[in-house]
Amino acid sequence: MQQIAASQARPPFYRDERVLGVISQIVVVGIAVGLLSYFYSNMVSALRNQLGVAINYGFLRSTAGFDIGESLIAYTRSDTYLRALIVGLLNTLQVAILGIFFATLWGTLIGIMRLSTNFLVSRIAAVYIDIFRNIPLLLLLIFWAQAVFFKLPRVQEALILPGPTFLSNRGIAIPWGVPTDSWPTYRLILLVGLILAFVVARLLQEQGKRTGRMPLLTLWFVVTFVVVGVIGWFVLPQPLTLTTPELVGFNTQGGRVFSQQFLALLTGLIVYTASFIAETVRAGIQSVTKGQREAATALGLTGFQTLRLIIFPQALRVIVPPLTSQYLNLTKNSSLAIAVGYPDLFAVAGNTILNQTGRAIEVFSLVMGIYLFFSLTTSLFMNIYNQRIRLIER
């Protein structure tokens, strides 16, 4: 009887579902690796035998020989292709980070407006979402570039806003700080302020858990960081020198100029992505049961307190996973910058560098690898955050 029971409990390995599952996965991985190896070797041999070209990334050390209209770091046409690639990468990061930040704020606001009891506010949000979700992004970018920013007044007739800020068909010129000798020390002070802000927020969070009255963590985080920054500003001898833009001839000098191509790309990405984020926020808020709102009202909480302390913490568990997808989409959609003339990673590498070097395999492998790194990094941080806020069940 024991032998029969043992044989029933332990089937042969070729009938064991766990063993078969492992074997099938090994077979699938082996087939995939084999196919990739075959295609790669076939590509390498074809390039070598037919074109006499070998895959080599040494061209990145050659002189680029072309200018880039916008750059966050110093760049001239005598620099290498590698530096030009870095310029495009930083331009993409600039658009992606700013786009994610403002699209999140704008999309959250529209999502809350969509659930407003005010008929006019709710309808405005609904119309906004229906319009911009159903317009192709490429068309939207061209519209912002050609029909909005390109139609602004010329530089000589620029709109002068407080600051002073000059708005023209070449972009927007704003006051900007130029680093001085004390700037590196001030950056260290800002780093200390950031660490101190995290510590203060953590301590307040623990206090809130003990007392049951959660403070405004974001507010205190910002206040702590700003206070440290202000103290460092007055202690050090002026880390930044403020330069203001001014009209000189047919252009502006001083300050920082954001081109109309950058503004068109950033605005299009924000407006488009925010419409999807708004629906994500709306769905997350509606996932919280009505009883939670009624209980908050019975406790005497205001509408803002209910949203901040009761609704949003629970809604985040539903909002964050699809929100991650929207962040990834915004970063990858920034590759459409070439349509409006903004020198992002794809425009610099996939267009200019490729045309000058003819290194299609190398260039596109670099571009795809960088975008893959962006996506995986974003997913990693969002998944870590999602794990921290998830509901732990017993």
Image: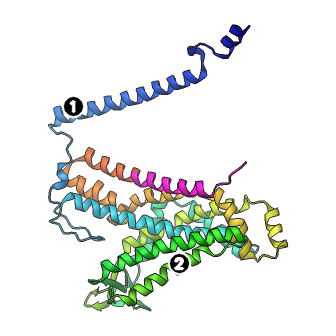
Which is more N-terminal, label 2 or label 1? 1
265 relative position to 105: left or right? left
Which residue is depicted at the point 16% across and 63% down? 65
Q: Is residue 138 visible?
A: yes
Number of numbered tags placed on the structure image: 2
Q: State the separation of the CA atoms marked 1 and 2.
A: 57 Å
Q: Position of residue 186 (x, y in %)?
A: 35, 80
The percent coordinates of residue 212 (x first, y second) are 73, 70
Residue toward you, 334 or 37? 37
Residue 143 visible in the snapshot: no
Kindly state the secondary structure of the residue where label 1 is placed.
Answer: helix
Q: Is residue 38 magenta?
A: no
Residue highlighted by disc 1: 45
From the image, tell me which residue sits under label 2: 222
Position of residue 311 measured from the top left corner of the image (x, y, whole percent): 72, 66
Which residue appears at 44% of the width and 73% of the height?
147
- Taking the view exactly as shown, the residue that stands out farthest to the right is 298
Question: Considering depth in this image, is 261 or 68 the residue closer to the camera?
Answer: 68
The location of residue 15, given as percent across then percent down, is 60, 15
**Is disc 1 surrounded by few (<14), some (14 to 19) or many (20+) residues within 10 Å?**
some
Find the magenta span and give its range: 373-394
Name the residue rendered at 24%, 52% in the picture.
Answer: 354
Mark 1 vs mark 2, foreground winner is 2
Q: Amino acid at mark 2?
A: Val
Left or right of residue 76: residue 347:
right
Q: Are marks 1 and 2 in contact (CB under 8 Å)?
A: no
